[in-house]
Amino acid sequence: MVFAIILLAAMAFCALKESKVTGLYRTFGVYGRFAAYMSLFCPIGVVMFIASFFTEGTGWAQRGGFLAMAAFGALFYLNALRKCPGFLKVKCIPAMLISGLGLCVKIFVFFIGGVWKLTGPKEVLGADGQVLYLYNHQVYTAGGELVGDAAPDGQSYVKRS
């Protein structure tokens, strides 16, 4: 529980700081958002490799894949360190983690919001000003009570008796 709260706080912090941190390093040509995002493969691969020792049925071939994933992500860190000016080198890898995790959170929030808009119920306004939801040609209240059937135009409905 405490770990989850710490992780959520870290994710919120990274999402808020991502633009500023990435902008600084992008200005000096060290890394951009794509490289920061891809560098997340390194810690993910390392964690998966360690976790594989605590799960059944994980063979060395799969563990090797986790290490390969970690090595792939590490290439982005090494490339950024190679390009990094001396006064930014100490903060380069933590900054990449902030940029990558912040970008990941922003993509996730956008994706969930976009999917909800595409697949979620359509909002319609009732005659009394109440917000109703249109789903499968039926109209529901926010509490889930069926109130009627939608008209073909999708803007009005016929009340059920």
Image (spheres, helix red, strand yellow):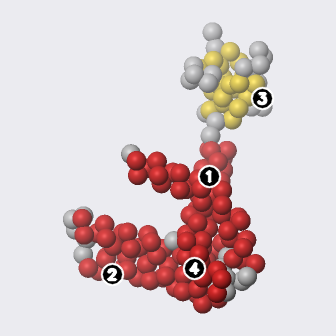
- Residue denoted by label 4: 90
Q: Earlier in the sequence, mark 2 or mark 4?
A: 2
Q: x, y (%) of residue 98? A: 58, 66
- Examine the rendered structure and indicate whether residue 50 appears above or below residue 74: above
Q: Are marks 1 and 4 in contact (CB under 8 Å)?
A: no
Q: CA distance from mark 2 to mark 4?
A: 30 Å
Q: Are marks 2 and 4 in contact (CB under 8 Å)?
A: no
Q: Earlier in the sequence, mark 2 or mark 3?
A: 2
Residue at the spot 70% in from the left edge and 64% down from the top edge: 19
Q: Are marks 3 and 4 in contact (CB under 8 Å)?
A: no
Front: mark 3 or 1: 1
Numbered label attached to residue 64: 2
Q: Secondary structure at mark 3?
A: loop
Residue at the spot 62% in from the left edge and 32% down from the top edge: 135
- Residue denoted by label 3: 155
Amino acid type shown at disc 2: Gly
Front: mark 3 or 4: 4
- Residue denoted by label 1: 109
Amino acid type shown at disc 4: Val
Name the quarter where the N terminus is drawn.
top left
Q: CA distance from mark 1 to mark 4?
A: 30 Å
Asked whether, in this view, residue 5 is left or right of residue 107, the answer is left
Q: Earlier in the sequence, mark 3 or mark 1?
A: 1
Q: Earlier in the sequence, mark 1 or mark 4?
A: 4
Q: Secondary structure at mark 2?
A: helix
Q: x, y (%) of residue 87? A: 66, 83
Q: CA distance from mark 3 to mark 4?
A: 58 Å
